[in-house]
Structures are given as C-alpha cells and as structure tokens.
Amino acid sequence: MKKIYVFKRWAIVACLLITFFCISITANASSFAYSDFNWEEFLEQNKNYWVQVCETDDKECQDEILKTKEKFYKRLYSLLTKFENKGYKINDNIIIETVFYGLTPDTFRDEGTLKDEYVGQIHKYGYKVDEGNKKESYIASTDNDIEGAREYFKNETDSLKTLMNAMIGYSQVCYGVSASAPRAVQNENGTTSYVCDGEEFVPMNGQCVAKVDILEASFFDAIGLSIFSSENNDDKCKALTTMYPSYKLGEVTDNGVNEDLYWKFLENNIYFDNKPQLQDYFDLVLKKTNHKKMEELTLDEYKANKDDIIDARKRIITYIKEVLDNYGDFAETPSSTFASYVAGNNDLYWWPVGGSEITNNGNIAMAIGTPTSTRITSKFGVRVHPVTGKAGSMHYGVDIGATEGVASVIAAKSGVVVYPPQGNKGNCVKGDQSCGGSYGNYVIIQHSDGNYTLYAHMATNSLRVAAGDSVVQGQVIGTVGSTGRSTGGHVHFEVRVGGNSGSAAQEPLNFISADNPRPVSASSVTEGGASSGSSNLIEFIHSWEGTPKQSGSDYIAFDDGYGNVTIGWGVVPKYNKDRFLSLGVDPNSITVGSKVSKSVVDRVEQMELDSALNSIKSMLSKEGITLQGYQIDALVSRKYNYNVNGFADAYKKYGTSQALYDNYMSKPITASGVRSQGLVRRREAEWELFSKGIYKMNS
C-alpha cells in the first residue's frame, strides 16, 4: 500500500511539472502587463483543470498541486514584474519551457531511475526558488570554476533570476589608445581645454582614444560564468586594436532584452548538462568519457569534448525553439504525454527560392516575399540525365530554375545545418562538374521532425551558413548558381524523410507548393484554425498500436510479428535511424530485448508524427483540399501505420461517401501477405473517425 502511495505522490509531482503550460492566459509575453498577474483569478480559471489528476475526495493531492502552482507562478511573475518595471519585457513562455524541457511522467515514477537523482533539484512544491531572494546569481571567479557553476545550477538557487538576467543585452565601446596624452590648450576666455593629436582621437580620462567598434555582451559574459574560455570583449577589443599602442573598453551600456544572447548563454554554460532528464542528449560525450552522467566529467574532459557538448546543447535549444514556434505559447514539453500535439506544427515547408527583397532580422538575412521563381525545370523521379544523357537516371529532387547569382535560396523550414563544415563558403566553381559530388556548393539542414532538406548547385562563395548553425524558415542560406553537374542557373531541392541519404528522398512537391509557397498556419488546410483535430489523437493511435513492453524508465524492443524490431508505441528503429542518432542512440544497436529510454523513444515517436502531420498538411494545401481537424487525425493515424499515397485523387473522386472507404480507406488489411483482423478493425476505426469524428479506441 505504501509503494502505491509513493508512486501516486511522484505521479502528482510529474503532473505539476508537465502541465505548467496548461494555463488559460491567452496572451503572449508582449500583450499583458506582468504586474497585472492576479493569482486568485488565475487559480479560479485553472483550478478544476489542475486537480483533475486527483481523486475527487483526495484533498491532500489537490492541496499539494495548488501549492505548487502558487509558489511557481507567484515567483515567476514577481520576478518578471521586477524586470518589466526596469523596462525589460521578457517572454515568460521561453523561461517556462527552458526550465521544464524534457520532463516526463516517468521521471518521477517510483521505479524510475531518474527520480532519486532529480529530487535533489526539485523543490517539494515542484521547483526550488530562493523565496527570500537572499542569494544573487552565481558569479564564477574564473572561466574554469566548473564546480561552482555545477553547485549553483544543481541547487537551482534563484535560477529563474539567472535565466532572466541572461535575456538582457549590453554593449561596450572598444577604444584604441594613443601613446600621447592629451595636450592642454588655453582658451581665449581663460579656461583650459584638452586636445589630442590626430583627427580620430579624443580626450577621455587623461588618455587620447579612438572609437574602434561597439561590442555586444551579455550579463554573463561580464561575470565570467561560462566554463569554457570563449573569446570575451577584452580579447575582441585587443584583436581589433593591434595598430594602436594599447586599448581600453568603455563602460557597459544596457541595450534591453536580447533573446539571441539568452540562447548563447544556454549554449555556452552548463545549465542543461546536469539535468537527469537531458542526459540522453549528451550520450556521445558520455560514451567517449566512459561516464554515466555529465556531472562526473572533469574539467579536462569538459575541455577535450567542448565541441560535442556544445552540439548537444544546441540540439536541446533547437527543440525548445521548435516547441515555442510550432506549438504556440502554451506548448507542453515535447517528450511529455503528447497532450499538446494537437496544437500542431505550423512550420510547413516553404518554397526554397526567396523573394526579391532581402531584409535583416537582427543579423539574419531573410527573403520571405513571393518567390522570384517557381519554374520547375526537372521533376523528381527517373529521367534522362540532362548532362550525361543517360536514360533511367534517378533524380532525387526537383530543379527550380532561377537567375544565377541573383536569386536567393532560403531555408524551407527551421532547423540545424549539418553541411557544409564551418569555413566552407562555397568553394566549388562553375564548370567543375565533379565538385561537391556533382552537387556543387550545397547545404543540408536537419529539422525537428527528423527530415532533412538539401539545396544544391549554389553560386561560388555564396553560402551563408555552415554545420552547427541554427536557421529559421525563410533565412537566406545562399544564392542560386550553376556549380557541380549543372546546365544552368537553378537550385536542386530534396526532402529526405527520416534520414540523410539519397535513398530517403521523397517527392518534394508533397511538401512544397508553387501555388502556396509560404504556408504559415494550419488554417490554410483546416477549418477553424485547428491543426490536427482533437487531444484524443495520441490516445487513439496508442490504443491501436498496443501497449508497449516496458521496464521502469525504459521501453523494451520486440518483434511486431512481421520481422520488424519495434519499440514503444509502434516505433520501428530502422525507419527512424537519423531520429535516434540525433538523440544519441545508435538504432542499429536496438534488437529484440534491447532497452531504450522512454524519453528518447517518445521523442522519436513525436518526430515521426510531426513529419506525418506536416506531409499531410502540405499535400492538402497543394491539392486545395480543406478538411476538419478530426479528418486530418484519421490521416495521421493511417500514415503512421501505413501511408496516404493516392488520398487526394480518391477524395476528389469520392468525397466523404462510402465509396471512399470501399475504394481507399478500407485498405490495406494485410501484413506480409497475411490478412490481419487487427488491421481490418483499425481501418474501420479510422473511417469512423474520418467520416463521423468519432475516436473509437481499440478495446
């Protein structure tokens, strides 16, 4: 009986942590004053939702949840109000998602392997805060004070304030200093002025200085919190002033909120490193150092594995950004219970040729206007090669003709660049047909749904991004060219589904549309703005995939009966190789009986579902088909289990009549040539969902 009670208590805490986004405030960070936050009103709006996990008569459970909510939200909005009063409008959702990213209910299960590790970092009411505000943010004495930084973040001492400080940007003027001091000059009115020799110099505090540059800085650059000795403003200024006898930095100037510096802070500091629920992201480092947890690494091991550690943090940051961008203001953590999946992924694929006007968003060049070209010069599939003349050549993408050296190539979707390597701006020159493996100058971007996009034949020295860079949809990544094996100015565009190889390439026109080149939300394909129907979608899919084999915080791989190694809720590793690799797990090592962290498998499942949803919405947009959210849910279930090839033609022919079921939705019902009664029932359930909006679970 005691064990059941403990399990329930930890389940309560898990609920506390993964439901912080489930709130009824419908404004984003910029549309309401944080000082107006009223806990009593907020409690009244959300109380019934928060306590629904408890039994009706379990007052202890209900009180514990509400105390948790009160402590966290009062502290959060108290701090946000203080910053707001100083003129800093910080996005509350960014802070919340950063704090709770990666937490799952299994983190807190009684038998979970992470529970004992994480309890030391979690306040008994859900999040440890310095209520008295007695301790200021941790200040490292040197860049190498790894133990001090670890202790600070492990204890979560006022880390909400730390994160908010990281949002504030500063600047310093870099001055070159002359060898000559200012000269005194007697003015006609009897006063004395000081002047410097040389037009560029002005007197300042007894020195002659010349303004060289204005350098950006974060709060934490100044206090030296990073454990990696990255180039600071002093180093930068010194490098910029080699032509002067000496240099100096001016006073730090406040520049307001700067979210780019916030992500830079998380990238270069150990905030994520010791969180138990994020250890899978650091799997490569842990394997290299033969450790089980990042907190076991020595300073020398940190320095030796600096690049891999930063890459892991970048992946976490990328997924956090994707959650914030794609799931709206109140998205849940991506590997929780998938309850927020229905918020949808509005980041549909864009036409990869940019508009005629390039604008700058900070330091990012964007070309999001109407594409300068939508002219397809060669389609996906088997063709006669235009250069070699060889018949039967497979073309893995589409070629879009555009003005060489002028038209911009843009990221079709947000993600992280995996090619070219840093320093390569596009070394291939026109005429060298073998350069870049015939692709010429090209870029490959990995997306959060597990897919990759490739952009080839770009102009010499035009590449603006390199491996490790995070890019946003519509960002200029290069210029149309004709390098590699090419007959004229164009961009070769590929969509590689679930893996980064030519064999993973699929018809790009299932993802992009010349008729709708810049889809911005699901409202273009669904009524009422819903992006994927109902919150019952995941429950529906899980009921038909069957209960997974599991042990504590791991899933156990099994044979699905048709020779496919499967794990979790119908996840097949061989179809999700790059998705597993992106989370630090070798899919080839997963065999029947293997154990894999639930957080990893659940994340792969979501990536696969995201990909299915994106593909379906792109197809509907291209075909001009409008469906209800529950109808899209039915198609997502079908694609997760099989595919939706030919749906558009069948729908245009039969509509939602019984003929659509008879001729399309009722198939397939066999697996490996054997009729499956389970598939028959699943097809029937998907049809009932598509035609009537009824989520019929498998019992």
Image (cartoon, rainbow, N blue to C red):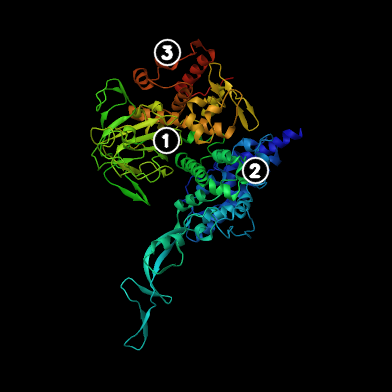
Amino acid residing under circle 2: Tyr
Picture quadrant where residue 116 is located: top right
Q: Residue furthest right?
A: 1
Q: Quadrant of residue 661?
A: top left
Q: Which numbered disc, 2 or 1, marks the residue that appears first in the sequence?
A: 2
Residue 57 percent location from the top left of the image: 70, 36
**Residue at mark 3:** 662
Task: Identify the amino acid type marked 3.
Answer: Asp
The CA distance from mark 2 to mark 3 is 53 Å
Classify 10 Å Cα crowding around label 2: few (below 14), some (14-19), many (20 and above): some
* Few, some or many residues within 10 Å of mark 3 (<14, 14–19, 20+): few
Q: Which one is nearer the viewer's eye here, 257 or 388?
A: 388
Which residue occupies the extreme top position in the image? 674
Q: Position of residue 267 (x, y in %)?
A: 50, 48
Which numbered circle lies on residue 529?
Answer: 1
Position of residue 625 measured from the top left corner of the image (x, y, whole percent): 36, 27
User: Which label's residue is closer to the chain start, 3 or 1?
Assistant: 1
Labels 2 and 3: the sequence-earlier one: 2
Q: Quadrant of the C terminus?
A: top right
Res. 351 visible in picture: no
Compared with residue 80, is residue 10 higher up or lower down, i.e. above or below? Answer: above
Residue 422 lies left or right of residue 297; in this view the side is: left
Residue 190 appears in view: yes
Give the secondary structure at mark 3.
helix
Q: Are marks 2 and 3 in contact (CB under 8 Å)?
A: no
Q: Residues within 10 Å of mark 1 (few under 14, many from 20)?
A: some
Query: Which residue was labeled with disc 2?
Result: 118
